Image (cartoon, rainbow, N blue to C red):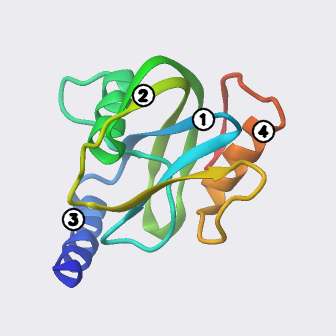
Amino acid sequence: MTLVLRILYRLRKVYQFIIHPINLGVRVMLIQDGKVLLVRHVYQDGWFMPGGGMKRRETLEQAARRECHEEAGVEMQRIGLFGIFFNYSEWKSDHIALFFSEDFTMTDKKDGEIAEKKFFALDDLPEALGSGHRRRLQEYQAGIKQIQHGVW
């Protein structure tokens, strides 16, 4: 089943490149007690902040709340915008709205696309963390909590 999901994930990337050359998505830094909650997908290697693409008639905040609930079983009370970033790697033209929340609760909700969710200390992040995710978490740890923009 994992192989099928990986193949479908790759096919979706090709489809998006051809049909939807510009993508808008969300990610969320979920921080509590000096730790960040990260997820590992079944179809993609590495650890990531919860997030994904927007749906029709959805605001950025609604998308962030939905993705956190779907991928991590998280209900956020307060949420803030950290910044807007872009990623042009792998033929993409992705634009990412990054939110953060320090006020959330977790449920036991399971998602078929998530292999694992886990808290990591901000000063001991996993090796298999995407470089954009690592940069944003380092900025957060350095005390940056304002709207910014740049390369993911």
**Residue 90 at x, y percent in the picture:** 47, 70
Helix, strand or loop at label 4? It is: helix
Q: Residues within 10 Å of mark 2 (few under 14, many from 20)?
A: few
Q: Earlier in the sequence, mark 2 or mark 4?
A: 2
Q: Is residue 102 above or below residue 124?
A: above
Q: Amino acid at mark 4?
A: Gln
Tell which tag, 1 or 4, sits nearer the viewer: 1
Label 1 Cα neighbours within 10 Å, binned few <14 / some 14-19 / many ≥20: many
Residue type, mark 1 in image: Ile
Residue name at image x 60 percent, y 64 percent: 129
Element on which disc 2 rests: strand
First in sequence, mark 3 or 1: give its number.
3
Confirm or deny contact between disc 4 and disc 3 (CB under 8 A): no
In the picture of the structure, the residue carrying the numbered disc 4 is 141
What residue is shown with label 3? Answer: 15
Location of residue 47 in the rendering, given as x and y in whole percent from the top left corner:
51, 62
Pointer 2: what residue? Answer: 105
**CB of mark 1 within 8 Å of CB of mark 2?**
no
Disc number at residue 48?
none
Expressed as whole percent of the image width and height from the top left, the position of residue 63 reads 32, 31
Q: Amino acid at mark 2?
A: Thr
**Residue mark closest to the camera, 4 vs 3:** 4
Q: Residue furthest right?
A: 142
Q: Position of residue 17 (x, y in %)?
A: 31, 62
Against 118, is 86 above or below? above
